Amino acid sequence: MAEDIILGIDLGTTFSAMAYVNRHGKPVIIPNSEGQSTTPSVLHFYGPGACVVGEEAVKAVVLDPDNVVRFVKRHMGEPGYALEYYGHTYSAQELSALILKKLKEDAEAALGVTIKDAVITVPAYFNSPQRGATAEAGALAGLNILSIINEPTAAAIAYGVERLGGRRKMLVFDLGGGTFDVTVMEIQGSSLRTLATEGNAELGGKDWDDRLLAHVAEAFQRQFGMDPLDDPQVHQELYERVLSAKIALSVKPRVVVPVNYAGNRTVVTVTREEFESISKDLVDQCAETCAIVLERAALRWSDLDDILLAGGSTRMPMIHALVRRLSGREPTSGINPDECVAHGASLAGVFRHRPNHPALARRHRPAPEAAGAPETGLPQGVSIVDVATHPLGMIALDALNQEQVVTLIPMGVPLPYDKRRRFAYPYDRLTAIRVEVTEGTGERREDVTVIGEVILDNLPPRPRGTPIDVVYRYTVNNILEVDVIDVETRAARKARISLKGGLSGAEMDAAIQRIAVAKVH
Ligand code: ADP
Ligand code: MG
């Protein structure tokens, strides 16, 4: 039984959640040790090697800010990123691993089993190093990462869209705590495919918190001429009250926030209308991001069949109103938006990696019109087609020996995707070849990012034109495998680009001359 469970993990920027698929095929959120369905992705270091994750760490945000880590996800795959606490240095992967470790341990305690396998979700726009760093964090937490899947794909699976049949286009609107991601996907029969995606990494629930906090603090200041945010302790308490007030405003028309500072007390009343008017420009920014994605997918709102909401901040009525106004329809409902990504991750894990799951064995084919979350039994034959979200290529030399980026994997192709391309020695008597792997759009080195390199050395010296093959394999897990092969001697060198954000498996030899492979034509 133990090895049967796949932990579906939504490793969020501000909150993380986890789920598993029970024997009836129903995804179930696993509460953390505090009994909550989501866990703040926050760490507090309180001594050498001593760290607490979650709600407890949030309490230290204002009081001990220097030892609190938030928004680690924004630094995943960032070269050289490191933070030091009590004499120990942590990479983004190591910090994320501490969050994952808490989730794993809490899940094991809640379910009474040992958990090994997991599926972790990442934003659709994450590039290979960011995905690799996420997989590495999982491994560091003692998990066997079966897949890294896109958050909107997971949300779509959780909403049960595979039951809809036919050909449908949907928009996943994911407004979380610190980021906003919009993805347009297409379902054809039972396969799911990402058409376009765009994120605003500077927009999320935190901005609404800050607006409300400033509004309440200003009201106090107008009355007493002093700013309650000047005192860290008061700031912390007020922030917590404002956060609860924001959440209450999602269901109530007005809230009261007590403020108590320097012997002065007052109660600030905030109506939902006021809250909406102070955050109107934030809502407008959401609309802008949607417009960008739709334009990229060459679609209009009227072309969409479903609007799916993900992320805790979509619980705010102003977001529902925005979606209704833009799309002219009601968003699909039925699952908690802050739980749907974890649900989908656990379902995707079973579809892909547990063909003998009891729920799959006695599944039935649901009626095409039966939308909504799967209740019992898993649908048959779901296939998830993710697409490459960035073009991948390499730097080669053109006929005039000028550097040029050659794209091997275009943006938007369905994964997995393989490409083999033949190149040639640009000069006589070379004994080593260096392939620089690039990510991004453009023809020149300055336009793209070099995400790794593969060196094939100890080659016999041969003339210009000697053939070299380069193979790129972009796997469904969004990991890029690169092979550089000397056609004549069959000598080859491989690298898996994502796992360390640079080259892995390829040898670095500083003595090798920096060269590029010439294109044949
Ligand atoms: P992440 O961005 O890390 O994926 P979530 O999707 O869980 O996180 O979203 C977290 C955000 O959702 C936080 O800003 C939180 O305050 C907000 N949120 C959660 N519930 C509600 C609610 N009922 N009303 C308004 N905002 C909410
Ligand atoms: Mg999220």
Image: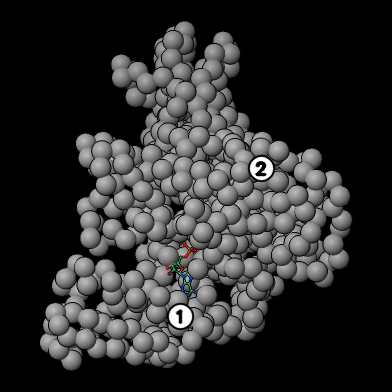
Give me the residue at 54% from left, 13% from top.
Answer: 491
Is 388 left, or right, of 51 in this rendering?
Answer: right
The answer, for residue 181, to whether it is visible in the render is yes
The answer, for residue 84, to whether it is visible in the render is no
Is 299 left, or right, of 484 in this rendering?
Answer: right
Which residue is under mark 2? 5
Confirm or reject: label 2 Cβ below 8 Å from ligand 2: no
Task: Relative to 260, say whether 371 is above or below.
Answer: above
Give me the residue at 28% from left, 58% from top.
Answer: 60
Determine contact: label 2, label 1, CB under 8 Å: no
Between 252 and 111, the one lying in front of the other is 111
Could you tell me which secondary element the residue under label 2 belongs to? loop
Task: Relative to 101, say whether 376 is above or below.
Answer: below
Disc assigned to residue 248: 1
Give me the residue at 28% from left, 60% from top.
Answer: 61
Identify which amino acid the numbered label 1 is placed on: Ala
Identify which amino acid the numbered label 2 is placed on: Ile
Task: Relative to 494, say whether 189 is above or below.
Answer: below
The percent coordinates of residue 237 (x first, y second) are 28, 71
**Picture quadrant where residue 452 is located:** top left
Confirm or reject: label 1 Cβ below 8 Å from ligand 1: no
Could you tell me which secondary element the residue under label 1 belongs to? helix
- Image quadrant holding the N terminus, namely top right
Task: Relative to 184, say whether 127 is above or below.
Answer: above
Between 232 and 311, the one lying in front of the other is 232
Mark 2 or 1, nearer chain start: 2
